[in-house]
Image (cartoon, grey):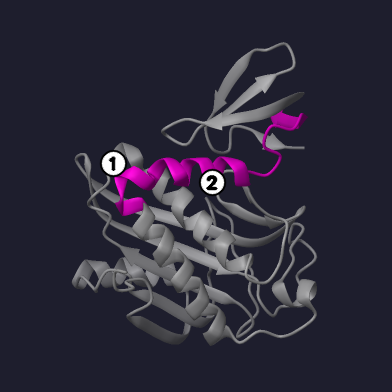
Amino acid sequence: MSEQIIGNNIIYNEIIPSTNTYATHLLKHKRPPEGTIISTKQQTAGRGHGTNRWESKPGKNLTISIVLYPDFLKANEQFLLSMTISLGIKDFLELFIDNIYIKWPNDIYVSDDKIAGILIENSISGNSFDYCIAGIGININQEKFTPNAVNPVSLIQITGRKHSLNDTLNLLCRQLDFRYNQLKDIRKRQNIKANYLNSLYHYREFVQFKHKNKIFTAKITGIDSSGRLIIRHKNGKTEKFEFHEVSFT
């Protein structure tokens, strides 16, 4: 077995605005070892996609960012990285609970509730990766959430017991490292794609979607190489959607 990369170097701060922002500033000045994790007890400006914010009570959850140098991937293969990180988190959660799904593109759900979010920021030079920062927030021991949080759930709420953040971080790193090694092996990338598809929330189920102001019934049939969602309408027509173009109702 290859030596574990992810989690071998951990930079911990009690309080910072955002682990992704910290990692970005760090990379401007030096190049930490691949797999370096930025971890914190409290984020004052935790970021999600776009203008979204990640809510996490201090000392209750895993809030980390991972620095990766996936120079073995081409720039147009970057969604494979999103699949890999999503599956690593799913694998980790399945050590404790069942019914884990990936809500396209990379929210992690337990049944119909959100337990984790991912914010991946890539630096691309030409057709090659410079670096990747994978920000991860997983609800571990938080029992109460703000009223405006959308369908949140945590590990403690499901299992009924408190979990060590150090132990869960070590387990998470192990699962992510396993998936990252899969990604490096071109022969195993089809496994990643297949595992991701089969883990998708509402995969191959007819459900209601919203696009602009239109609501329609369709089912997810796949993901293209750039990460676009492929859905099929009841009349057989197929469409592809970019992130934020379509949502579940």
- Name which residue type carries label 1: Ala
Give the image quarter of residue 133: bottom left
**Residue 243 image position (x, y, % from top left):** 54, 38
**Residue 131 image position (x, y, % from top left):** 27, 57
Question: Looking at the image, is 115 positioned above or below residue 194?
Answer: below
Give the image quarter of residue 115: bottom right
Label 1: element kind: helix
Label 2 and label 1: CA atoms lie apart by 22 Å
Residue on which disc 1 sits: 75
- Name which residue type carries label 2: Asn
Residue on which disc 2 sits: 195
Question: Looking at the image, is 126 positioned above or below residue 208?
Answer: below
Query: How many numbered marks have been drawn onto this rendered protein structure?
Result: 2
Position of 109 with respect to 89 (left or right) is right
Based on the picture, tell me whether residue 194 belongs to the magenta stretch. Answer: yes
**Residue 34 image position (x, y, % from top left):** 27, 69
Question: Looking at the image, is 102 positioned above or below residue 94?
Answer: above
The magenta segment:
183-211
Based on the picture, tell me whether residue 167 belongs to the magenta stretch. Answer: no
Position of 99 with respect to 137 (left or right) is right
